[in-house]
Image (cartoon, helix red, strand yellow):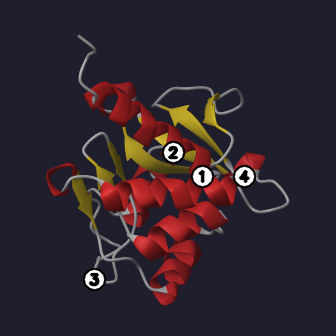
Amino acid sequence: MTRAYIVGAMTAIRQAEASDRDVGKGASEETIQQAEEMLRLRFPPSYRAFLSAFGYGGTREAYLFGLCDSFDFAVASEPNVVAINLDWRKSGLPDHVLLIESRGRLGYHALDFSTCDQSGETAVIEWHEGCDPKSPVTVAEDFGQFLRDRLEAAATSRAPAAA
């Protein structure tokens, strides 16, 4: 089901109005592998698909950290997933957590690599400074479901109210 979720979500991003969409041009396999090496993680297949297709970004309501072939991995600014996570690790972010979306004062959405299944997919959790990494709040079973749910919620919130 994850494959269907990620394909559907990426289609929704491509079909979003240009004013609601801000995405990169995709990251090369070499850039993705370099990021994985620096973070000492193997990205889930659904997140890898997103990185390959877009690199980073999304819609106004679901803007995700990611990669671009021209990113300087040492510069910790959004949407650079490598630098943001390496910077947060200096402040105690567990190595098995990968921040993928800022929620402002509410913290972040993150991939939880301690939940990695046989297919390589990980749960998406809520993370904020001071949260208990042993009992995170799970948002979605995997990145594909997370992205699809975020985009559906955004589309619902933009839909005109029935008269």
Numbered disc 1: secondary structure: helix
Identify the residue at image location x=81%, y=54%. Answer: 117
Q: Answer yes or no: do the residues labelled 1 and 2 have beta carbons within 8 Å?
A: yes
Q: Which residue is mark 2?
A: 148
* Structural distance between the alpha carbons of marks 3 and 2: 27 Å
Q: Answer yes or no: do the residues labelled 1 and 4 have beta carbons within 8 Å?
A: yes
Quadrant of res 28: bottom left
Q: Is residue 43 at all visible to an observer of this figure? A: no
Q: Amino acid at mark 2?
A: Arg
N-term mark: 3 or 4? 4
Label 1 crowd bin: few (<14), some (14–19), many (20+), radius 10 Å: some
Q: Nearer the viewer, residue 53 or 35?
A: 53
* Structural distance between the alpha carbons of marks 2 and 4: 11 Å
Q: Which residue is mark 3?
A: 70
Above or below for 51 versus 155? below
Q: Nearer the viewer, residue 88 or 22?
A: 22
Q: Quadrant of the C terminus?
A: top left
Numbered disc 2: secondary structure: helix
Q: Answer yes or no: do the residues labelled 3 and 4 have beta carbons within 8 Å?
A: no
Label 4 crowd bin: few (<14), some (14–19), many (20+), radius 10 Å: few
Q: Which residue is mark 1?
A: 5
Mark 3 or 2, closer to the camera: 2
Residue 162 appears left or right of 44: left
N-term mark: 2 or 4? 4
Residue 99 appears left or right of 102: right
